[in-house]
Amino acid sequence: MICGYRVNFPMPLCARRPLYDVFLLFVAMFCVVLPILCHRLHYSIYYSQTLHMGGTDPFSYAMKVNDERKNLAQATLLSQPTWPSHILHNADAKAKLAIGIVTVNRQVYIREGSLYHPGYIIQSVTAILRENPSKKTPLVVCDVDPDPPYHSDAVFLSGIVPVRSKYLNKTIAPPSEMTDIFKKEKEDYMYCLKQTLSFKSEFILLLQDDALATPGALDILNHIIQTKIEKKYRGFELIDSNFTKTFFKLFTPTYMQNDFHTTKPRRIFVHLLELVGMGIVGGTIITILHSSLRKVRSRSYATIYVFFLGSVVCCGLAAWAASRVHLMEWRRISKYFYIMFQADGCCMPAILYSRDTAINFLEYLETTRNSTIPIDLEMDELVENHGYESFAVEPNLFSHIGMYSSIQSKINREFQHGFV
């Protein structure tokens, strides 16, 4: 009260300080830091196609990236006169893992009728060979093209790795033009599964020719087999596990890995925990730095708590804005950080089977070989109605580079960002 008048003094600066600092944190995070870091990340809300691709349209950019990979793969194969003799594996030897790659000739007419040759199988085989697989790891390429001599990539690779052509000896009649595309896909997959099973390995890794191994994929896969499939951790102890009726997906489409893009309750719960965890960890780090720089007195607990809660919310929202797909990349630091949980349906570019599961799946496909259902839906049918399980390894151990679909005989323009 001054001279009979009530005076309302403004809120003390010490009371406004934490809210003001939280406001500055939000402005700095969402207006400066994230736009700079995330403008090239496709699933981020800050993604800029212009800044990422330099004004080039996505189709041309994807082709450019693919050509660079293809040329590098060809140079790698030609630079080494002979590859390790273990590629020519003895079928009578017991193997831990056998790798089969299903391939068909892919050439597509693009603009103005020009013929484009993507060379996916050359890239996939080179990526596997770069991993320097164990001498007990056989590799076979299954050429299922109706005209084997016309598949020039498979012909080229036949001098480097074993290539088995389904229609080369004419013992199997090539499919007619009226053959259902999904039926042929199933027959081709069954053929390669049989060829890979002939190596008598404990596990089967079956790849499509447009599945590209990420660096260290086979070493990580071996670790997952040893610590998550054959055995699993209970506390700090490894105990026997039982995955006899299980499929392991080593690639999941990236859009399906995004925040809450799933119908699986367990995955939704995991995604929510990841966001909360990132918010708490990020908020803790920022609060510690803030307290150190501002030299907050130890008795100012209210100031610290307010700023900490604001920081947690800020970091959680920032993680959502950057997207789970890109934030998962930190797990690639070490093979010990990879996770495995319930998979969504769809897609089979890279599947790991135990031997028993592969045999059972092959027998099931034999009973449904006249069905026109796509093979990935056949697998989903086993999971949903026959007691099988399907798990996904994250982050992906393989990427899907096949912009041109051999099944639909067209360029997949809807998800071109996934091929670069």
Image: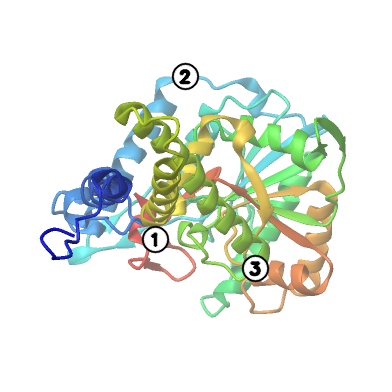
- The residue where tag 2 is placed is 81
Q: Earlier in the sequence, mark 2 or mark 3?
A: 2
Q: Quadrant of the N terminus?
A: bottom left
Residue in front for this viewpoint, 399 or 79: 399
Q: Is residue 65 visible?
A: yes
Residue in front for this viewpoint, 375 or 171: 375
Q: CA distance from mark 3 to mark 1?
A: 19 Å
Query: In this rendering, would 266 be left or right of 276?
Result: right
Based on the displayed image, in which of its 4 quarters is residue 273 positioned? Answer: bottom right
- The residue where tag 1 is placed is 404
Residue type indicated by callout 2: Pro
Residue type indicated by callout 3: Ile
Q: Earlier in the sequence, mark 3 or mark 1?
A: 3
- The residue under the point 57% across, 35% down is 217
Image coords of residue 19 (percent x, y): 31, 51
Query: In this rendering, would 390 be left or right of 311?
Result: right
Mark 3 Cα within 10 Å, few/some/many (few <14, many 20+)? Answer: many
Image coords of residue 376 (percent x, y): 63, 67
Residue in front for this viewpoint, 152 or 252: 252
- The residue where tag 3 is placed is 375
